[in-house]
Image (spheres, rainbow, N blue to C red):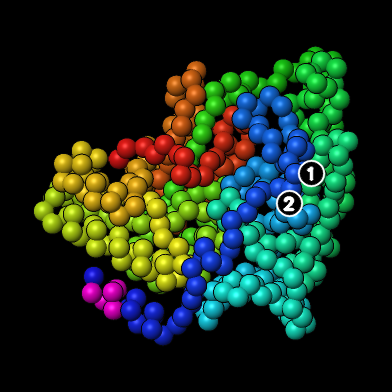
Amino acid sequence: MKKFSTKIKALILCALLFAAAFSQAVAGVQYNDAKYANYVNMNGENESGRIYIVPNLYRQDASYKNVKSFPLVVMNSVEYVPLEIFAMYSYIEVVYSKLSFGFYINNTNTNKYIAFNLEDGTTTTSADQAVDASVQMCYRTYYVPAKIVCDAVGLNFESYDNASDGIHAARVSDSSAKYTLAELVDMYSPKKNDTTRDGQTDEPDTGGSTQPDVGQGGQITPAPDDKYKNVLSRNVYLSFDNCPDEYTGNILDILRAYNCGATFFMTAEKILERPETVRRILVEGHNIGIYCPTDGASGEEYSASGETERILSETKEANEALKLITKKKARYVRIKGAHEKELKENGIEKALKDEGLVIYGYTFDTRNYGRAQGVYDALVREIAEKNTNRAATHYINFSSGAYSAPALSRFLEFCGKYTQFRTVKSDEYTVLPAL
């Protein structure tokens, strides 16, 4: 433990990463101007799955979402988008400053950039111009003015505003995009259908044929029965233990491709070893928690002796490292190898709660199922084949390892085929599972 504390102190003395409190740099915001607050696609929810609402933010030729299904924010008639939308371009980098409290967005192909200094509120570009642009905190993530950033780094920005159809939307793209924003809005808009409520269909019209396949001899070929299509709703929370490591980048790429949020649990050592990956995890909208294995995590019998002091010491150390790297503290902690009853009896749960930490358990551990194929098969059995006649919530734990990315990719592809299988990112309102 001493070597980590020493390392943290040295880093604090050697590099002033962030010099001002976040609350002083980013003011509280009122989401969405009054003009847009009543637009159907700005504040509407789609919890029941019965009414389809047009997305309000697009990247390239597809809708974009992060922790919110409709993440575009309009303040003072300026469209703000999540910072992470720019990190999804392979040639755009989002880098946190090591000398001041802020970050810059850089186009590595052209070296055009825009830099936000959150200490003094100034914003500058690669053309040595000061611009009137501010950063906002919305839905627990950084938001930046979309048009100003796009103009600065060489991306395209489009806005769609139509009060008659109740749609306000925006799109960030580059020259490889095939459609205009108006075309995308039309593609994602529900089509008129007299048999549906309020003239809306449940899903956008894909233009596909609804006629059955006709086989040889004019015989109708019945569609194969899908045993998962009638499974009731599933909410799935994803988490990853003992990160970041050499496999975390691939996991983040997959989560980004499927617009999924997750929680990554890490120790002080891992945080300090891979600070850029830690920052990327936050920029892309994921949660960070503290990983704290007990002696029971290695398969040995759990021993309560001295555990309270050790766990509190390790969680404090990890939070110090996280604050050094990101200016944030973790809310969640994962105690691996101990049961809830033991943690309560030993006073560990209460001690952590007094420090503002919540224990985050899980309902399914993938480490028990071998390689990627075994993990994928086990996940499908757990999520889609058990208790199919009632809704369920699952908290899936992936251990760090080479199998995680391919297993995750196949599982998310499977979930994407069914509207009732939904991945969810935990927040302060999430009811967390017991250990």
Q: Are marks 1 and 2 in contact (CB under 8 Å)?
A: yes
Q: Is residue 11 above or below residue 277?
A: below
Q: Is residue 189 magenta?
A: no
Q: Which residue is mark 2?
A: 74
Q: Is residue 308 above or below residue 225?
A: below
Q: Quadrant of residue 324?
A: bottom left
- Residue at the location (32% across, 37% down)? 434
Q: CA distance from mark 1 to mark 2?
A: 9 Å
Q: Residues within 10 Å of mark 2 (few under 14, many from 20)?
A: many
Q: Please name the amino acid that badge 1 sits on.
A: Lys
Q: Which residues are magenta?
A: 2-6
What amino acid is at disc 2? Answer: Val
- Which residue occupies the foreground of this view, 21 or 253? 21
Please name the residue shown 79% across and 44% down the image: 35
Tag shown at residue 35: 1
Q: Secondary structure at mark 2?
A: strand
How many numbered badges does the structure rendering display?
A: 2
Mark 1 or mark 2: name the one nearer the start of the chain. 1
Residue 75: image location, x then y, percent = 72, 54
Residue 53 lies in quadrant: top right
Q: Position of residue 182 (x, y in %)?
A: 88, 46
Residue at 68% from the left image edge and 24% from the top image edge: 50
Viewer-nearest residue: 255 or 190: 190
Taking the image as drawn, is residue 194 in sight? yes
Classified by dominant secondary structure, the portion drawn in magenta counts as helix
Q: Quadrant of the C terminus?
A: top left
* Secondary structure beneath label 1: helix
**Residue 341 location in percent, x, y?**
20, 38
**Which x, y percent locates residue 184?**
83, 45
- Using the image, tell me which numbered label, if any, was put on residue 315: none
